Each structure stands twice: as structure tokens, then as C-alpha cells.
Amino acid sequence: MEQWDALHAMLLYEILEMGVAPVDESESWKRKRRTKGLKSPFLSKMTQCFSRSYLESHDAALLPAPDAHGSWVKWAVTETARRTIFLANIVNFFSNRDFESGRQSPYYEPLNDELIMKMPLPCNQALWSARTEDEWRKASQMATPTSPAGSPGTTDPFSTFAAAAGAGAGGPHIPVGEQLPNTHQQPSLKVLFSKFAKDYLRANFATNAGFADSNELRSFIILCALEQFS
């Protein structure tokens, strides 16, 4: 837990320093942007240490999809760990990027790109907002194939991509917006990038990216990855 707290604090500090403009021009000397990437090696090593220790103590649970019949507590901890690593990767990449030239700082050290590409993306909002194991299981059951299309709890647009990504390369095209049942399992960035053109993904997720809920966060992670792994 102390590792989590330290890493979260470091990430918040780094985010606050990313391109904050001065409110008053006379105070601009107080807000001079530090040289990009000076803290990058430290942040990178903190995140790598966190991910390694988590993988060692949780039997590589960052990579397998959660078990629908498993423990809600274990699922929540694993989901939180993955989100932390996704965020650390985003901060590490963009805090070392020159947006004018599109180049990375010489201080930039990639995190575990293979892990980032293979981890399941964040779950939908219905599962993430559950506060008890009973709520969590009910949120899962509401998205079973027997649920009528369009009913509450089945309207996660990302499920369209998840289902299509799980189909074979020759599978039928699934229109964006078609209602599909939500599941625990989310595809990875690697699977999405192998199934869909990046311009197509960018066009579909750009309008729903943010931090308001889990679905927006997932879209934000995808957009950032499109920039990083283009």
C-alpha cells in the first residue's frame, strides 16, 4: 500500500507540472516549466518496481482477464493496479514529449511496453461503480445475453469493439452503437490495434474520452496509446 501511495503522489505531482500556464503574467517567473524529463527515470523505476512487486505477489494477475466467479476484492485490487500502471505510462510518455516537434526527451525511458499492450483495458462503469460484491455480481448479471438490448446496464459502446475484437478476422462487421452485452473481460490494446485501423479507433473514441467515468477513462487510454504506439 505504501508503494501505491508513493506512486500516486508522484503521478499527481508530475501531472500538476505538465504545462501549467501562469494566471498573471507578472507571476510568470514563478511558473517556469522545468526541463522536461528530469524526474522521468525516477518515475519509471517507481512504476517498474510497483508492477514487478505486484506481479510477483499476485501471480501475474495483471494480464489474465478477471474470473467472473472470483473474489470481488481481488478483482478490484487488480483493476486498480492496472489503471495505475496505465496512468503512469501516459504521464511518463507525455511529460517527456515535445508537442511542437513530436519528439521525446532524451531523458525518456519507456515503461514495460509489452505489459501496457497486453493488459486488459479498464472495465465498464457499471462494474467499476459497484461498492459491494453483491452490487458487482448484479452488474455482471445485468449484462448477460438474455438481457433485452437497450435495457439499463447494457449500453457500454465499447462492448461493440470488445465483441468484434474477439471475433475472427473474417467475422461480420458490427456497427458502432449496436447494443452488445457487457462482460468482465476487456480486450487489450494489442488486440484492438490488430483488429481495427488506428484512424477508425481514433474517430470513434475521441468524442468519449475523459475522466468522468470508467468508460471515458478507457477511451482516453486508447487515444493516448494511439499517439504513443503509432
Image (cartoon, rainbow, N blue to C red):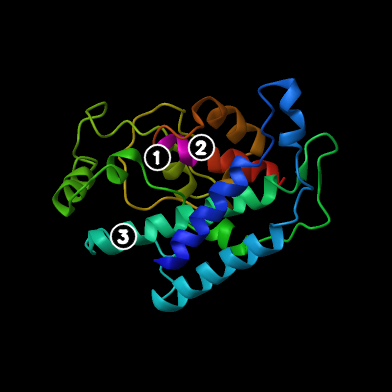
Residue positioned 54% across, 47% down in the render: 12
Total numbered labels: 3
User: Residue 65 got which mark?
Assistant: none
Amino acid bearing label 3: Trp
Answer with mark 3 or mark 2, whichever residue precedes in sequence: 3
Residue positioned 69% across, 45% down in the render: 94
Q: Are marks 1 and 3 in contact (CB under 8 Å)?
A: no
Residue at the spot of label 1: 214
Residue at the spot of label 2: 219
Amino acid bearing label 1: Ser
Question: Is residue 204 located in the magenta-colored stretch of the structure?
Answer: no
Q: Residue furthest left?
A: 134
Give the quadrant of residue 25. Answer: top right
Q: Is residue 107 left or right of residue 19?
A: right
**In the foreground, 56 or 6:** 6
Answer with mark 1 or mark 2, whichever residue precedes in sequence: 1
Q: Is residue 15 left or right of residue 78?
A: right
Q: Residue furthest front?
A: 26
Q: CA distance from mark 1 to mark 2?
A: 9 Å
Span of residues in magenta: 214-219
User: Residue 75 got which mark?
Assistant: 3
Q: CA distance from mark 1 to mark 3?
A: 15 Å
Q: CA distance from mark 3 to mark 2?
A: 21 Å
Above or below: residue 96 compared with residue 102: below
Mark 2 residue crowding within 10 angstroms, few (<14) / some (14–19) / many (20+): many
For residue 95, say whether it is visible: yes
Q: Are marks 3 and 2 in contact (CB under 8 Å)?
A: no
